[in-house]
Amino acid sequence: MPPAKGKAAITIAFPDDLHGVLASMAGDAKYSGSKSAVLETAFRHFVEGSVEITALDAVHQHLSTLKADMQGQVQEIQSATQALLQNLARVLQCLQQNHSKLEERIAALERQHTHHYNDLVRAYDTLAKERKNTASGGLRALFRPT
């Protein structure tokens, strides 16, 4: 029988045990008794499966590459983060030292302010007492020799 249009005729030698399976499968209604249809379907699945496997291998290779890239980037981020944390620790230490120095300076200024304030209060009290003692004469009386 000549091949149908768009098909090529081939002759194959098939093992007897598989020939029985082929004949049994061809008996299925979806193949209408055609061994060629069974072989065509099987070969298409084989080829498409190979293409799928090749595609899956390519996807796996791409995923492996992405994973390696991401691991490298994660390592870079971890290193940068570690360096940043170290820098922040040094900055914090400097800030704490400066804060302590400022607190010491503020305390010294408060002591100095208190001392000057007390001096001014004593001077005011002295001047007020002298003013009471000097009923007249104004400021000149404060500077007259006694």
Image: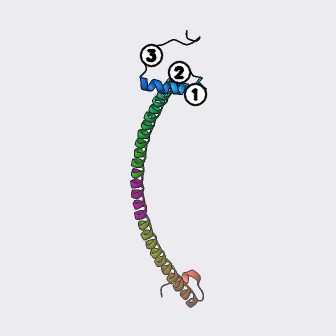
Q: Mark 1 points at which residue?
A: 28
Total number of numbered discs in the rendering: 3
What secondary structure is the stretch in magenta mostly built from?
Answer: helix
What amino acid does circle 2 point to? Lys
What is the CA distance from the residue labelled 2 to the residue labelled 3? 12 Å
Of the numbered discs 2 and 3, the one sitting upstream in the chain is: 3
Q: Name the residue under label 3.
A: 12
Q: Which of 126 and 130 is in front in this view?
A: 126
Q: What stretch is highlighted in magenta?
A: 83-98
Query: Dot 3, crowdedness within 10 Å: few (<14), some or many (≥20)?
Result: few
Of the numbered discs 3 and 1, the one sitting upstream in the chain is: 3
**Vertical arrangement, residue 100 with respect to residue 74, above or below:** below
Asked whether disc 2 touches disc 3, contact meaning CB atoms under 8 Å apart, the reply is no
Label 2: state its secondary structure. helix
Q: Mark 2 points at which residue?
A: 35
Label 1: state its secondary structure. loop
Of the residues tagged 3 and 1, which is closer to the observer?
1
Quadrant of the rendered structure where residue 100 is? Answer: bottom left
What amino acid does circle 1 point to? Asp
Q: Nearer the viewer, residue 64 or 102?
A: 64
Quadrant of the rendered structure where residue 75 is? Answer: top left
Residue 137, percent from left and from top: 58, 84
What is the CA distance from the residue labelled 3 to the residue labelled 1? 22 Å
**Vertical arrangement, residue 71 with respect to residue 85, above or below:** above
